[in-house]
Amino acid sequence: MKKIFFFLFLFFSFVPLVFADSIKNLEVINGTLSRKFESTNNVYSVILDESEDSLKITYELNDPEAKVVFHDNEYIENGKNKMSLEVENTDGTKEIYTFYLEKEETTPVFNETILSNNVYEQKEIPFLSWYVGAVCFILIALSFKVVVLGFKKNKKCLKKKF
């Protein structure tokens, strides 16, 4: 007989938690809810915008005189956080909605560039362009001699052998 009373006690203790629907409608203002809100579902995931420090929601209660208390909804940090919303109805039943918050730090694609009005003068090294030109001319002349004149000598050598 004690077992029956124990099971009835457990059943009637958890029925309001499982079948309670204290909130009719709920919307997240500054983030994205994992799925559409259902009054009988008490656990949700939310992705918060990076600039937000708390979860902002709008909700409609089934019992307009119910008390609503937010737990751990301040100073949300990057990473994973947990926030809960407790609704205590006038009939004494309580329901807790749990939100697992994920706040990711984004990195900018472009770094900020500071433009300045300072004009820097380019210092020219005297005769640098002349040296570069002379070196290029010598390299081209050597390449020409090796490639073009070298083939002519090799062709003459090959003809003499035959």
Image (cartoon, rainbow, N blue to C red):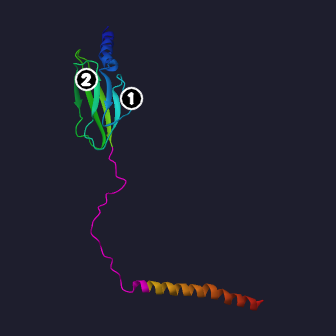
The image quadrant of residue 77 is top left
Task: State the quadrant of the N terminus.
Answer: top left
Looking at the picture, tell me which residue is in the foreground, 41 or 141. Answer: 141
Hey, what amino acid is under mark 1? Lys
Residue range corresponding to the magenta coloring: 104-130
Magenta stretch secondary structure, dominant = loop
Residue designated by label 2:
87
Residue at left offset 51%, top offset 86%: 137
Q: Is tag 1's residue or tag 2's residue first in the polypeptide sequence?
A: 1
Whole-percent x and y of residue 85? 26, 28
Give the left or right position of residue 137, taking residue 116 as reference: right
Contact check, label 1 and label 2, Cβ < 8 Å: no
Note whether 101 is above or below 155 in the view shown. Answer: above
Label 1 CA crowd tier, 10 Å (few <14, some 14–19, many 20+): few
Residue 120 among those drawn in magenta: yes
Which amino acid type is shown beneath numbered disc 2? Answer: Val
